[in-house]
Amino acid sequence: MAEITLSVIKADIGGYVGHSSSHPEILARAEQLLEKHKSEGTIIDFHVTRVGDDCELIMTHQKGVDNSEIHKIAWDTFVDLTELAKKLKLYGAGQDLLSDAFSGNVKGMGPGVAEMSFTERPSEPILIFMGDKTSPGAWNYPLYKIFADPFNTIGLVIDPKMHKGFSFEVVNVKEHKKVTLHAPDDLYDLLVLIGASEDYMIKSVHSRETGEIAAVSSTQKLSLIAGRYVGKDDPVMIVRCQSGFPAVGEVLEPFTNPYLVSGWMRGSHFGPFMPVAVDDANPARFDGPPRVIALGFQLANGKLIGPRDHFADPSFDNARRIANEIADYIRRMGPFEPHRLPLSEMEYTTMPQVMEKLKDRFQPFE
Ligand code: F6R
Ligand code: MG
Ligand code: MG
């Protein structure tokens, strides 16, 4: 069988209620639209889901990445869903569709995209992670843990197929530059970049043993695309598992630590990334805390066998409890950094108005 492409394309086309969740009719309509493309044979299979107010289209096909036909399917679906969202007067209808006309590729138009092509292995387990109330840099920490940290992934130490390590493609989305770094050789160089996760993001990971693609993430930042606040650039990530890649359990393990991510309330606060079941992915407290879901599939000739809802598991209860404790603690800081993001990263600000109002009251100070 020729290469399979897995495309995950997502957009917030309207929230229910506020920015907290998605309306069931939206998901049903998306399924109906994609079913038509499946029956026509353009896509092999699909799964529609949502995290918070984001609608996620998971599709398999054989047209490769960046394919205009597939991107148009996603774009037209989001446009159609926006019409329904407007009819239901959902909140922020069409907020992630930044352009009126499709130009061949949804990148740069608002939706988030993670895609990869590969020859399906005899058994092909994959995990798809989707976040809400956060931003693309959120995947740096788990990708490092999964593919470079032997305290997380014992396979790096004891599996001969993983012992050479993995290569990381790191992009700087502000300067439009990228660099490939190899673990373990370049570990410290890698960390100095990806630890600054608002600037540097891991775009993809490859096996150094086989050259095969192991993981890919979405790196679209809506604020950079639009040049002003237009909504959250909630990201997605695909990870291939097992047989030379990290085990499913090694891929899920970093999420037992609810690390801090940016994007909570008004896209302007740090908060703990809480791993939850799809049914619990409705950020309610202070529009958060930020949520992540993990759906697992076995691919069978491009068919999506699944999903399994991997965070719907009691072994993540402790992570959720800790996330709630961190949320209680950090919320007490109110409008102070580091709960509030630094000035340059906030998506809402009144600073220009305040400075204008106070300009005559400012005095020189040595
Ligand atoms: C949306 C988000 C929310 C909104 C907040 C204010 O993803 O993060 O916290 O920023 O609810 O929304 P508006 O300005 O639309 O009233
Ligand atoms: Mg929204
Ligand atoms: Mg969202």
Image: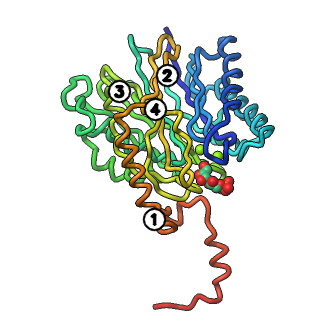
- Mark 3 vs mark 2: give the one in front: 2
**Residue denoted by label 1:** 332
Residue 33 occupies quadrant: top right
Kindly report the distance in space between the C-alpha atoms of the residues bearing marks 2 and 1: 38 Å
Amino acid type for the residue under numbered disc 4? Ala
Q: What kind of residue is marked 2? A: Pro
Q: Which three-letter amino acid code belongs to the residue tagged 3?
A: Val
Q: Residue 138: percent from the left, percent from the top?
A: 45, 46
The location of residue 156, given as percent across then percent down, is 24, 31
Q: CA distance from mark 4 to mark 2?
A: 9 Å
> What residue is shown with label 4?
294
Q: Residue at x 59, y 58 (%)?
A: 347
Q: Are marks 2 and 1 in contact (CB under 8 Å)?
A: no
Q: Earlier in the sequence, mark 2 or mark 1?
A: 2
User: How dense is the environment of label 3, judged by Cα within 10 Å: few (below 14), some, or many (20 and up)?
Assistant: some
**180 lies left or right of 61:** left
For the point 47% across and 16% down, the residue is: 299
Q: Which element carries disc 3, helix, strand or loop?
A: helix
Provide the residue designation for mark 2: 307
State the residue at coordinates (55%, 46%). Answer: 283
**Residue highlighted by disc 3:** 248
Could you say where residue 340 lies in the image, as x and y percent from the top left? 50, 63
Which tag, 3 or 4, sits closer to the chain's start?
A: 3
Q: Residues within 10 Å of mark 2 (few under 14, many from 20)?
A: some
Q: Amino acid at mark 1?
A: Arg
Q: Give the quarter of the image for residue 142.
A: top left
